[in-house]
Image (tube, rainbow, N blue to C red):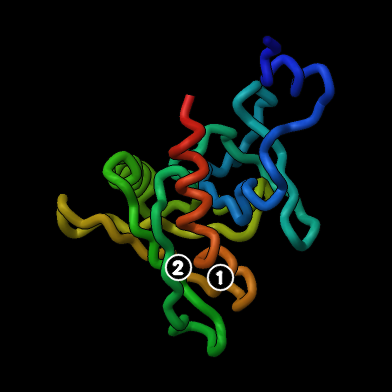
Amino acid sequence: MRCETWDEAISGESKVKEDDKPKYVISVHEIVKYPRGTMIEKEVTSFGGRTIWINVNPFIHTRNIPKVEILPSKEKDGFYDLQLTLDRRGRMLWTQLSVEFNRTDVALLIDGVFYRSFQPEQLDDEEDMVVVIKGPFDPVTAKCIEKYAEKDYKYFEENKK
């Protein structure tokens, strides 16, 4: 009997179908203003081509967000804000993030590419599981994040190590 993981490693092929792989994975990172080139810092490119430095350890990740809903942006017509429903661990991480980075920008990455920075808002209630990331998010990106959020969350839940 052969080990499937070993076969994947040898052939370089994954048994995960392309359709099953996560799409529109979002993560929130600390922005590093003065990079020191340590192993936990990384330069990432934005969709527009500019680069920023981040701490590679995300505070929040798709694996902590079982649901995303889009809300019309009050700042820009035709654009959206993201309403994230967090799991229990995600709520604890968001609480830490919003206290540590109160009035400070953090980076939102989509599939490892810098999308925008934002300031995390503190939760009002210890039982609150919903947070809003104010956009504006373009319609295509916002709708795709909403569409794939549950599927991507389940993927990471099923593939915990």
Task: From the viewer's side, name the closer residue of 7 and 39.
Answer: 7
Quarter occupied by the N terminus: top right
Mark 2 in CB contact with mark 1 (< 8 angstroms): yes
Is residue 97 found left or right of 9 in the rendered image? left
**x 45%, y 74%: residue:** 70
Extreme residue in the bottom direction: 77
- Rendered location of residue 73, percent (x, y): 46, 81
Residue under pointer 1: 142
Circle 1: is it few (<14), some (14-19), or many (20+) Cα within 10 Å?
A: many
**Amino acid of disc 2:** Leu
Task: From the viewer's side, name the closer residue of 31 and 148.
Answer: 148
Is residue 114 found left or right of 101 in the rendered image? right
Mark positioned earlier in the residue sequence (2 or 1): 2
**x 48%, y 83%: residue:** 75
Residue under pointer 2: 82
**x 51%, y 33%: residue:** 159
Residue 15 lies in what quarter of the image?
top right
**Amino acid of disc 1:** Ala
- Rendered location of residue 134, percent (x, y): 45, 69
Q: Using the image, determine if residue 121 lies above or below residue 60.
A: below
